[in-house]
Image (cartoon, grey):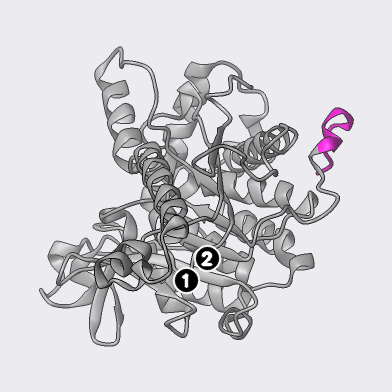
Amino acid sequence: MSPPPELNSHVAKERPPFGRIALLLQGGGALGSYQGGVYAALSEANIEPDWVAGISIGALNSALIAGNPPESRVARLREFWREITGGTLAIPLIEGAIKGDYLRRVVNQFRAMEVLFAGAPDFFKPRILPPFLHTPGTIEALSFCDTTPLRATLERLVDFDRINAGKIRLSVGATDVRTGNFVYFDTTTHKIRPEHIMASGALPPGFPPIEIGGEFYWDGGVVSNTPLQWVLDSRPCEDTLAFQVDLWSARGEVPCDITEVDVRTKDIRYSSRTRLGTDQFKRMQKLRRAIDRLMKELPGDRRNDPELKLIEAESDEKVYNIVHLIYHARKYEGVSKDIEFSRRTMEEHWSSGYNDTVRTLSHPGVLERPANAEGFSTFDLSADGRK
């Protein structure tokens, strides 16, 4: 896919002036192809991340990026998304002729129902018997679907030796079923295997928990659906350019009917208060930079006081640009948009991610170091009013 001629300004001529470029990918099931489009535009613009962090479907996309060489990543993402989308019904014969939100909503609901009954190719398949008909304590009794096909797909499309070689830092978030705590599997602390990626996407009750080292893990989205805080709190600090790719929009319209109530509730829940986290970090960063300036003005002997050493540890002179790329669903997508794995919708999501990223990168300042007092800037496509 080539960019429109008028948008060629999104291509970076040199690496942006940041020590770290991070790509942060939210969970969102079938909406995840939006992230594929985002990465395709970043790659085309010669912006390659040093760190990829993801949760749920974001973890799968992260593994595909970190587990392949730069020249193969977009192709691998495309291959993955083409394999897990499609459908067995005859709807593709007429989909191109379907116009209008109402008909699209009907077709999308049929597609979502098909996934519930037939699964998604090379991803998951429904169990023949529902979980309550299996013996308690067995893995079959814990979910409606079997994710065994996903392991084979990951082993085929992802080079885990490359991931663990550390060319790109990879972090995937999961939930410890026993403790309820959020856990990150990170290449700086773990040897990442397919089960770590699968654990991050094991959303109950659809998918079973994944056992790793004697413990069981569910989807990270059970606790938090965005890896933003993990990256921002990482030490040592680095000048950071972070692309936060959200699949759920915290902002939206007041619902008009009960169906829209379900859609809006789901958006708010899985958006995981990304903007709140960004705002809190901005306030903290302003305070940390003030501490840094004050500590530098103190006489050397005073800076050795234990109490001041403790305060100094919280100082930070680094700068941060957070670029929000948020998927805004069309009205016809409905409450089942995250399980609607049709080829046509996948392509729409991919194109949206690509176009949103091209426009954002064309915006002056996105790739420049912030010059404000707090050393922190955020860019938001929707807030900036660009379409």
Q: Which residue is mark 1?
A: 149
Q: Is residue 355 left or right of residue 123?
A: right
Amino acid type at image mark 1: Pro
Viewer-nearest residue: 386 or 146:
386
Bounds of the magenta segment: 1-9
Crowd around label 1: few <14 · some 14–19 · many ≥20 (10 Å):
some
Which quadrant holds residue 350?
top right
Q: How far across and down, in percent of the image, does residue 203 sit?
A: 31, 58
Residue 114 within the magenta-colored segment of the rendering = no
Q: Position of residue 323 (x, y in %)?
A: 57, 41
The answer to if 4 sits in the magenta stretch is yes
Q: Is residue 38 visible?
A: yes
244 versus 71 height, above or below: above
Residue at numbered disc 2: 122
Amino acid found under the numbered disc labelled 2: Asp
x 80%, y 44%: residue: 1
Q: Are marks 1 and 2 in contact (CB under 8 Å)?
A: yes
Q: Secondary structure at mark 2?
A: loop
What residue occupies the far left of the structure in this picture? 136
Q: Position of residue 153 (x, y in %)?
A: 55, 72
Name the image quarter holding the C terminus: top right
Residue located at (31% from left, 61% from top) = 311
